[in-house]
Image (cartoon, helix red, strand yellow):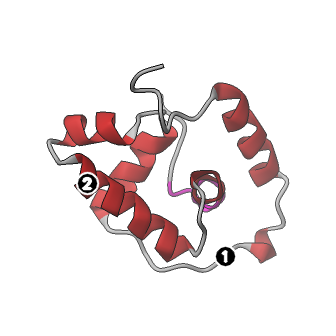
Amino acid sequence: MAGAKGLLCPRLRVIITYFIRSADPSSMMKHQPLTPREREVLQLVWEGLSTRDIAKKLGRSYNTIAMYRQQIRGKFGVTTTAAVLKIALREGIITEKK
């Protein structure tokens, strides 16, 4: 499936949302604040865009977007996209696409 790498399947999105809503608010992680561009990239990841698609949409290189994603994981202190999305949803950094 060309271009599908990095997409978040709808079923996984439902599972992550369930766990976030049932999480103990006192267990929220503290992290470094995200830049506006990092927030924008993170929102696009949540909406299901691949790194390549985000690069095209924002007029940036693939490597630049990959770097943003790496910086976001570092700021959140996690290694996976699913973990980043869980934290971002719980803290209201990203929202459902309307």
Q: Give the magenta part as a residue range.
A: 87-93
Mark closer to the observer (1, 2): 2
Mark sitting earlier along the chain (1/2) = 1
Q: Nearer the viewer, residue 38 or 97?
A: 38
Q: Nearer the viewer, residue 8 or 89?
A: 8
Marks 1 and 2 sit apart, C-alpha to C-alpha, by: 28 Å
Q: Does dot 1 land on a helix, a strand or a loop?
A: loop
Question: Who's the residue at 48% across and 75% down the image?
Answer: 75
Residue type, mark 2 in image: Asn
Question: Who's the residue at 30% across and 53% down the image?
Answer: 65
The residue singled out by tag 1 in the image is: 29
Q: Is residue 5 left or right of residue 66?
A: right
Q: Does dot 2 land on a helix, a strand or a loop?
A: helix
Q: Percent from the top left, x then y, of residue 91?
A: 60, 62
Task: Write down the quadrant of residue 13 in the picture.
Answer: top right
Q: Percent from the top left, x then y, of residue 85?
A: 59, 52
Indicate yes or no whether the magenta region holds residue 81. Answer: no
Residue with the most extreme front position: 1
Indicate yes or no whether the magenta region holds residue 92. Answer: yes
